[in-house]
Image (tube, grey):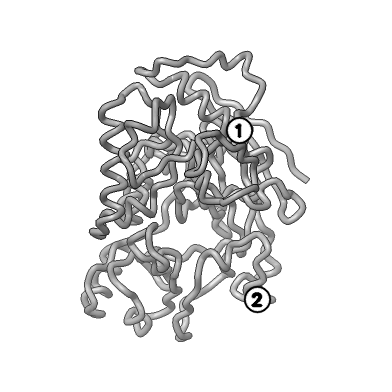
Amino acid sequence: MQLDLNQPLEGQGPFTVILHKLTDIIALTNQGDPKARVMISHVESYINDHPEVAIIDPLDNVRKLLDRYRYYSIIHNSDLEKADVFMPSFVELTSSDCKENLKTLRLAGVDFPFVCKPSVAHGSSNAHKMAVIFNEKGVKDCRPPCVAQSFINHNAILYKIYLVGDEYFVVDRPSLKNFYPSDRETIFFDSHDVSKADSTSSLSILDPSDKMILPSRPDPAKLQRIVCTLRKELGMSLLGIDVIIENGSGRYGIIDINAYPGYDGYPNFFDSLMNCILETVNHHPCTVYKPDLSSTQFCLPLTKHTAESKNSHIMSPGSGDQDDSGFDTGDSSDEKKKRNLSVGSTTVSRRSITTTSE
């Protein structure tokens, strides 16, 4: 059932599990929005009064992903470096003074070119508006508060890992082409426009001299290590992880993470989502309802109450308002638009992966 967050949830239950996409509302709450604050208050009050209800995902864990510098630091401090997986050098810029920012960049080891990203990762139309800074002169184009991250050349290929509970799927996407320190002007871009499956951005077209560099194919074992580590560190079931492979060294770099991504290209997404829901409920320590996962062969329809009637209406994937489910599932099963790289699963007791590639 779709919840009415403008009203207390007590009269709308009881519930076994609450699946939400409240990133933008939480971000607006942090910015002082009164309506958003009331909505979050209704959710948190119900959660506190009903520990038996499972939440996907816990609000405190979601809050970690609203601040880029915070979750970059979590990744940096994890043990992924032991697996030769790194977070490119980064630092938060909070000053408008260019000289002070240059000093901050040097101390953090952030080299030119670097990507300047807003510190707020959700809840703003500017969250995905970024810039590539090539030289000291371009530092004036930084808009604090922001995170500066060294740009790593990766032949314009981004690997997106879509995580759904114990399952994940990997697709490749266009990315920024190779860049080098130069006296060129700052490039401003929207990351959504560059990395869409059908993107035709000129920023993704390699220069002739770079086309001779053969791209590396991702190692499934390395991707699984990333998934296992970040799920543990962040405590999230629904994640999008952006991974690149550095030219020359072959090192794996994590350049960003998204809470509740669009899952475009994820086959049979709702089957995986239902598995995630059932697993979460089954392992929730206080839940009253324990589903028999071995015999569950079906996916329950999404339902919502309408103002005109108390009867539930079946919401099939792709029908009705996308806001009903909170997930952008448009074209999520269309595998013709992109190359699917691998699919895998990870559990607490075992580690396994099966791969398919075209």
Residue 298 lies, in percent from the top left, at 65, 24
The answer to whether the residue labelled 1 contacts the one labelled 2, judged by CB atoms less than 8 Å apart, is no
Residue 258 lies, in percent from the top left, at 46, 51
Residue at (47, 36) in percent of width and height: 237
Using residue 89 as the reference point, say whether residue 19 is left or right of it: right
In the image, what residue type sits under mark 1?
Answer: Pro
Residue 147 lies, in percent from the top left, at 34, 64
How far apart are the alpha carbons under marks 1 and 2? 48 Å
Q: Is residue 346 above or below residue 39?
A: above
Residue at (52, 46) in percent of width and height: 324
| Quarter location, residue 213 | bottom right
> Which mark is nearer the camera, 1 or 2?
1
Earlier residue among tags 1 and 2: 2
In the image, what residue type sits under mark 2?
Answer: Asp
Q: Nearer the viewer, residue 209 or 105?
A: 105
Using residue 315 as the reference point, say whether residue 56 is left or right of it: left
Sort mark 2 into few (<14), some (14-19) or many (20+) by Cα contacts within 10 Å: few
Q: Secondary structure at mark 2?
A: loop
Residue at (67, 31) in percent of width and height: 354
Which mark is drawn over residue 207? 2
Which mark is drawn over residue 95? none
| Quarter location, residue 212 | bottom right
Q: Secondary structure at mark 1?
A: loop
Using residue 99 as the reference point, say whether residue 285 is left or right of it: right
Which mark is drawn over residue 301? 1
Sort mark 1 into few (<14), some (14-19) or many (20+) by Cα contacts within 10 Å: some
